Amino acid sequence: MILKGKSAIVTGSTSGIGLAMAKAFAAEGASVTINGFGDSAAIEQERAELERVSGTRARYDGADLMDPAAIVRLVEACHAETGGPDIVVNNAGMQHVAPIEDFPVEQYDRIIALNMSAAWHMARAVVPLMRARKWGRIISTASAHSLIASPNKSAYIMAKHGIAGMTKAVALEVATSGITANCISPGYVWTPLVENQIPDTMRARGLTRDQVMNDVLLAAQPTKRFVTPEEIAALALFLCREEARSITGANLSADGGWTAQ
Ligand code: NAD
């Protein structure tokens, strides 16, 4: 168990990629703090299962990552109860699909707050704790959209490019402190986030569900299959290993060849 004794926060881990990461960390013995929204009984079931698998404490914190003060409270509570965090994954995210001229301003503000600013507030809060322990892993779930663009996703693409920039900046600041900062850039992963944007894309582009799946989403992905949450979790886990200590400031693609084109 390579993460025995380590404490990890994974934001947005009540479903999708974040939940797969929480499970991967717990399977290696980490004390995991999960976060996100959803049915409270289902969340409690996941938390209890993480505790069973890891053999150590698993916590749930319902902090709204759009609120900077709530992020600080999330970190403080994790520190008080576990001594960590040693590992933080900035993963919570949302999407809204619309042409820029019709893009609702409040949706733009929410995407920038959750998909970008939350990662900065998190890094700001955890770096002093990680410096004190001379070890840390800051991982952010970026996207192929941190490297390239697609139409009708302007706010998301701005936020993900921002994540890639923050990763490089923070990596340089903590380079001699035993802390690494990296981001992972998946292509299309089959999760609720992707499923939920299909109706908007159908409307925005006048397409059927099958056309959106095959001609829009998988059209960009040369492997012609969705990435799985478990593949992304395995990469995040690798970044937590000692052997990964020279990987820092990197933007690691796991996109089925999308950005190779
Ligand atoms: P998901 O919808 O399954 O999970 C999103 C998580 O974020 C959920 O746990 C949700 O409850 C949580 N969340 C939403 N708003 C929140 C808030 N205000 N505060 C705290 N938590 C909140 O989505 P996913 O596909 O697993 O996405 C996870 C990350 O991966 C996102 O950052 C997303 O941009 C990124 N990503 C996803 C894909 C993909 O194809 N699915 C591709 C590239 C990047």
Image: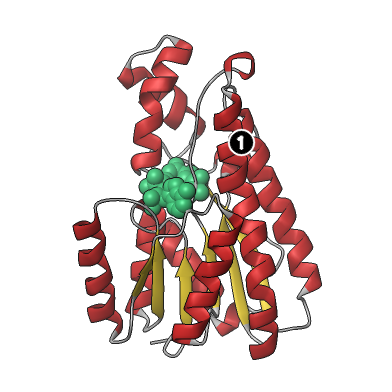
Q: Residue at x 56, y 39 (%)?
A: 110
Amino acid identity at mark 1: Asp
Q: Quadrant of residue 4?
A: bottom left
Residue 121 pos. (x, y %): 65, 60
In the figure, 74 relative to 222: above or below?
Answer: below
Picture quadrant of residue 199: top left
261 above or below 15? above
Task: Decide if ligand 1 comes within 8 Å of the CB at mark 1.
Answer: no
Identified at 35% across, 44% down, the residue is: 191
**Quadrant of the drawing holding the C terminus:** top right
Near-viewer residue (111 or 190): 111
Q: Secondary structure at mark 1?
A: helix
Residue located 31% across and 20% down the image? 210
Nearer to me, 147 or 132: 132
Pick the front one: 103 or 246: 103
Can residue 173 be seen here? The reply is yes
Q: Position of residue 224 (x, y in %)?
A: 40, 36
Q: Quadrant of the N terminus?
A: bottom left
> Does residue 252 appear anywhere in the picture?
no
Which residue is situated farthest in the top direction here?
Answer: 206
Residue under label 1:
109
